[in-house]
Amino acid sequence: MMEMSKYIDDLVKRLPNLKKSQKINDIKQMIKDTPEGLTKKEIIQKLKWGGGILWTPYRRALLEDSNVYDICDSMPTYHWREDD
């Protein structure tokens, strides 16, 4: 059990810090520049990423920003919340 716990801790330490990632900043800017919003598929196409990218960490990092929100539909769309 302890060995497994150390292994998990080691894996977590290796995860990228996406909050400071330039790609997250690029994605946020793309969302901000697209008033109609962007789907995950559109974002991945614009970044020219392949199918091997894990989206979940990027989604979490995006939604931690109070200016980004998603509209859940058959294909979730990410939007930029303009300051009032």
Image (cartoon, grey):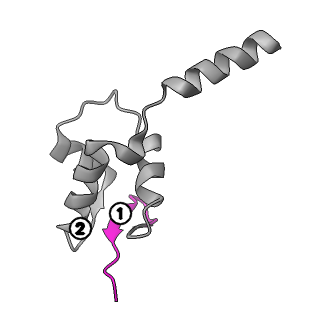
Residue at horizontal 22 percent and vertical 60 percent from the top: 29
* Local secondary structure at mark 1: strand
Q: Position of residue 64 (x, y in %)?
A: 48, 59
Furthest residue in direction bottom, as rendered: 84
| Camera-nearest residue between 38 and 1 | 1
Label 1 neighbourhood size at 10 Å, few (<14), some (14-19), many (20+)?
Answer: some
**Callout 2, which amino acid?**
Lys
* Local secondary structure at mark 2: helix
Residue at horizontal 35 percent and vertical 32 percent from the top: 53
Residue at horizontal 38 percent and vertical 58 percent from the top: 75
**Callout 1, which amino acid?**
Thr
Q: Which residues are magenta?
A: 70-84
Furthest residue in direction top, as rendered: 3
Residue at horizontal 66 percent and vertical 21 percent from the top: 8
Tell me how far mark 1 sits from mark 2, CA to CA: 12 Å
Mark 1 and mark 2 lie on one chain; the one further toward the N terminus is 2
Q: Nearer the viewer, mark 1 or mark 2?
A: 2
Q: Quadrant of residue 47?
A: top left
Q: Quadrant of residue 63?
A: bottom left
Residue under label 1, please give it. Answer: 77
Residue 79 covered by magenta stretch: yes
Residue under label 2, please give it. Answer: 32
